[in-house]
Image (cartoon, grey):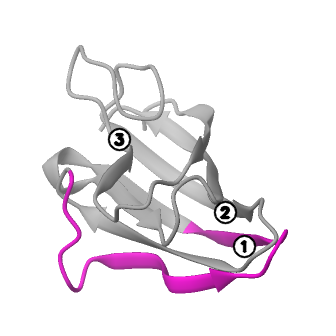
Amino acid sequence: MSQQKQEIFGPVALSATLTTNIIAPAAAGAGGVGYTATADRIRLKHIRIVNKTASPHNFTLFKGATGANAAGTEVVGVAKVIAANDVYDWYGDMVLEGTNGFLVGGADAGTSLTFEAEGEIGKV
């Protein structure tokens, strides 16, 4: 079993487009999206979305190819509404690996919601 490095991803503001790469595993010898490493597997355990505004906003996260949000690949918060000045926490075990291991998504209004996650980075 390979050794895993604990990592915090973000915080980063979600954009108003649902095809923004938020986190992606790095190719061998390259840096990933959302962190600086040369890892090729990410295991997310906790995602927190913060609404920093005085209005409700929603978000959707997809797992799949880079910059894509195909139907059926929604994984967290399908148009999930977060009340004004509130947070949403997801706990689970999501592995991001390879060319279909991108976490992609966004919000209904740019920079209204902030994404942060905790997990592990390691080799396959």
- The disc labelled 2 sits on which kind of residue? Ile
Of the numbered discs 2 and 1, the one sitting upstream in the chain is 2
**Between 98 and 102, which is closer to the camera in this rendering?**
102
For the residues marked 2 and 3, what is the alpha-carbon distance in whole angstroms? 22 Å
Question: Vertical placement of 22 versus 40: above or below?
Answer: below
Residue at 37% over, 34% down:
33
Could you tell me if the residues under marks 2 and 1 are in contact, i.e. CB atoms within 8 Å?
A: yes
- The disc labelled 1 sits on which kind of residue? Tyr
User: Which mark, by number, is residue 49?
Assistant: 2
Could you tell me if the residues under marks 2 and 3 are in contact, i.e. CB atoms within 8 Å?
A: no
Residue located beneath label 3 in the image: 41
**Between 1 and 121, which is closer to the camera in this rendering?**
121
Q: Residues within 10 Å of mark 3 (few under 14, many from 20)?
A: many
Q: In the rendered image, which quarter is residue 124 located in?
A: top left
Residue at 34% over, 65% down:
18
Q: In the rendered image, which quarter is residue 38 located in?
A: top left
Q: Is residue 32 left or right of residue 29?
A: right
Residue at 80% over, 75% down:
84
Please provide percent x and percent y for residue 4. Answer: 53, 33
SS assignment at label 3:
strand
Please provide percent x and percent y for residue 29. Answer: 23, 14
User: Which mark, by number, is residue 88?
Assistant: 1
SS assignment at label 1:
strand
- The magenta region covers 67-92
Q: Residues within 10 Å of mark 2 (few under 14, many from 20)?
A: many
